[in-house]
Image (cartoon, rainbow, N blue to C red):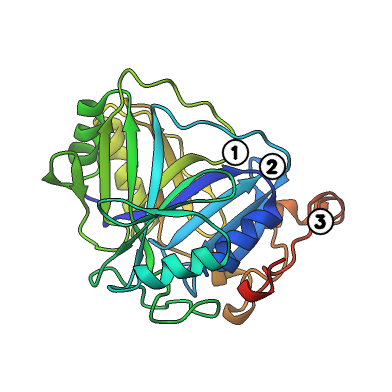
Amino acid sequence: MHTSGLHHVTVVSSDPQRNRDFYEGVLGLRLVKQTVNFDDPGTLHLYYGDGLGSPGTILTFFPIPGLTPGAAGTGVTERIALAVPSGAIPAWRARLDAAGIASADDATGLVVRDPDGLSIELVESDEISSATPWAARTDPAIAIQGIAGVYLASAAASSTERVMTAWLGLADHDAGVFRASAALGGTVTVRDAAGDPRTRRGAGIVHHIAFRAAGGGEQLQWLDHLRRSSAVPTPVQDREYFTSIYFREPGGVLLEIATDGPGFARDEAVDELGTRLCLPPWFEEHRAALEEHLPRLEPAPELGARA
Ligand code: ZN
């Protein structure tokens, strides 16, 4: 079996308004859903992506106010690469400068840290494009198109590499670099981090990465395939906007297989995505208590209006 690429990346963060100000206001992603962590409904779950929150464009956050910063070490996704159109990097450098956010060039792109210290790399690509890009907050010529790839720091790199090829069906592209069939969300880079300190969990640390399954039938095939590959996947879990199975690979990284559908327009009109707190039916009876307890977020200020 093979996955067509990454579906989403989920991160633990701290202050939710600061998170929104950065991902919506600075990076220009669309906040496509405000809901709760289904495993801990006292915590928000924010989803950002392209205009629809299409698979391969989604970054999600569990913001826990006041959470202390973590430190990425082994067994974790240590960097997320986001794709921008060719030639857009100079404009991004200027945009980040104007927002007072430090950025640095590296061999493959422009690296910036989110407010919790998570490493984000902007990479130019003509291949990686969204069918429904979101440019309400940026010039369409520079808008982020989606996830280009992820960088994994593995405690057992050869095992992690085997997971990428034998379990997930990615192609062995270059030393430590693996490619899925889709360009969007298509690249996984594995770094041998054996001997590095273990990851200290906290704000700015990636919780898990999810790969795509076309639908529920394919997800059941994945469940069977993973069990036969000696993984220990969870049963299928209903995440409302997709269904999920989770398993940990031998290098320590938590992985998920998520279905493409039903998607974020399930409970909101497309032009209203992300504008209110959405709850799955099983939490609806607790709405009043949750709304009382959860932080209420304002839209990110326009960049020029930042204090
Ligand atoms: Zn997930």
Rendered location of residue 128, percent (x, y)? 28, 68
Asked if disc 2 and disc 3 are in contact, CB closer than 8 Å, the reply is no
Asked if disc 1 and disc 2 are in contact, CB closer than 8 Å, the reply is yes
Q: Nearer the viewer, mark 3 or mark 1?
A: 1
Residue in the picture at 35% in, 67% down: 89
At numbered mark 3, what does the secondary structure look like: helix, strand or loop? helix
Foreground pick, 197 / 212: 197
At numbered mark 1, what does the secondary structure look like: helix, strand or loop? loop
The dot on residue 64 is 2
Instruction: Judge: label 1 CB < 8 Å from ligand 1.
Output: no
Rendered location of residue 60, percent (x, y)? 53, 53
Name the residue tied to disc 1. Answer: 203
Left/right placement of residue 168 relative to residue 296 reads left
Name the residue tied to disc 3. Answer: 287
Amino acid at the residue labelled 3: Arg
Query: Is residue 168 placed above or below 157 in the rendered structure?
Result: below
Asked if disc 3 and disc 1 are in contact, CB closer than 8 Å, the reply is no
Mark found first going from the N terminus, 1 or 2? 2
Left/right placement of residue 130 relative to residue 300 reads left
Q: Is residue 263 visible?
A: no
